[in-house]
Image (spheres, rainbow, N blue to C red):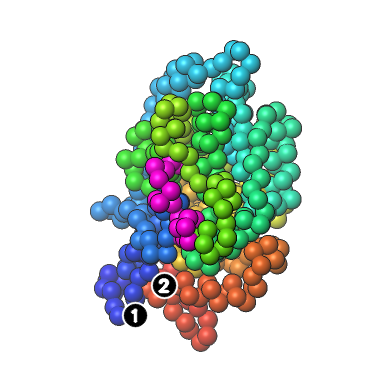
Amino acid sequence: MSLAVPTQRSEAKYGLPEAVVFCQRCVMSNQRPCSSVEFRHTKDRRHRTLRFDDEGVCDACRVAEQKEQIDWAKREEELLRLLDRHRRRDGGYDCIVPGSGGKDSAYAAHVLKYKYGMHPLTVTWPPILYTEIGWKNFRSWLEVGGFDNITFKPNGRVHRLLTRLAIEHLLHPFQTFILGQKNLAPKIALQTRVPLIFYGENEAEYGNPIADTSSSLRDRSYYTMRNLSEVYLAGLSIPELQERYRLSLNDLSAYLPADGHALEESQIEVHYLGYYLKWTPQESYYYAVEHTGFEANPFRTEGTYSKYNSLDDKIDGLHYYTTYIKFGIGRATYDASQEIRNKHLTREEGVALVRRFDGEFPERYLREVMDFIECSPERFLELCDTFRSPHLWKKVEGRWMLRCQVA
Ligand SMILES: [Zn+2]
């Protein structure tokens, strides 16, 4: 019971719950922040976190349970009605599938085109630094799968600067990627007048509020703005970025969300395909291998045991390392929790994998990533220590240890 009693040492950063609790079913803890509006992320933001119910089960596990009760045949009929409304016969594109060639976007684009007879345009905000396997899978997606694609390559100097600032201010190496991934497709939809966008899974499958799964539509707050004053990039306001770093609004425009007014008038709809089709990462993987030439890594991904999740960016490993520092949740915890929910692992197996691999330092691409952001590994590690919350971490004989580990 001592866990539930906050003591002086345990001042929680980022609005995290003081007492660490692990889900009874998966290996996720209550420290997991919900996915939220990326362009409102500031240094002082207090995160909403994964909710647990009276039985000690997390919302993501409850969503997985609900998925078993859904009448998927009926959902597919709903999808067919939606697609029938939008399918074009005049040679134009009728939907957009954002992605960089991972298994989920490969699966989504392929079923829409070859099973349901749609004409998707794939849209890519590329990884910050493509891995060899990521680049190969991206090429195969288009070449083997057979899709047209628009790739947007942001200004390298600005990208480098914003990625570094997001690390310095938020310890968030992935922020520039997430911003582009969320904002690019709606903006391309506005320009190309393609009115339908499909993302894969709802964020609620990983811990956003269950109520979010009741709609197929992606909440507009994720990708639209009313006013520039709402927007923060790398934790800084637009005027701060312009003044301190001599950036123009044009330099920053690639990272901004779509204009809310324009989007409303356009009647563009952004849907989760995972609302209509039962989504299982392992099944997407098998599907992508068969239909779009997808390949898993020949080696284990650092920080976890898996070989096919989130492989395409050299900065991925660092991203999960920083979630381990800030929330005590590493890559193996994310992977194992998802696989437990999909019944590919038992909780005991998950616990063993987390204890073995979580928090493993991502050495493989470290040098290249640090060169890219113009930071030394030593400086990066010092920075990490300033983001450790005392309610999660303690130093024992000169080494940082988590106060609570899953068991
Ligand atoms: Zn759970």
Work out how far the residue at label 2 is from the one at label 1, CA to CA, in angstroms: 10 Å
Instruction: Say what amino acid the circle numbered 1 marks.
Output: Arg
Instruction: Tell me what residue is drawn at x 43 percent, y 41 percent.
Output: 224
Say whether residue 171 is left or right of residue 373: left
Q: Is residue 81 magenta?
A: no
Quick check: can you spot residue 196?
yes
- Residue lying at the far bottom in this picture: please name it: 397
Rendered position, 251 above or below 19: above
**Image quadrant containing the N terminus:** bottom left
Residue at 65% in and 73% down: 376
318 left or right, relative to 19: right
Label 2: state its secondary structure.
Answer: loop
Q: Secondary structure at mark 1?
A: loop
Q: Give the percent coordinates (x, y) of residue 46.
A: 35, 61
| Place of residue 336 in the rendered image (x, y in percent of width and height, measured from the top left) | 51, 54
Q: Which residue is mark 2?
A: 389
Residue at x 61% of width, y 43% of height: 125
Amino acid found under the numbered disc labelled 2: Ser
Screen quadrant of the C terminus = bottom left
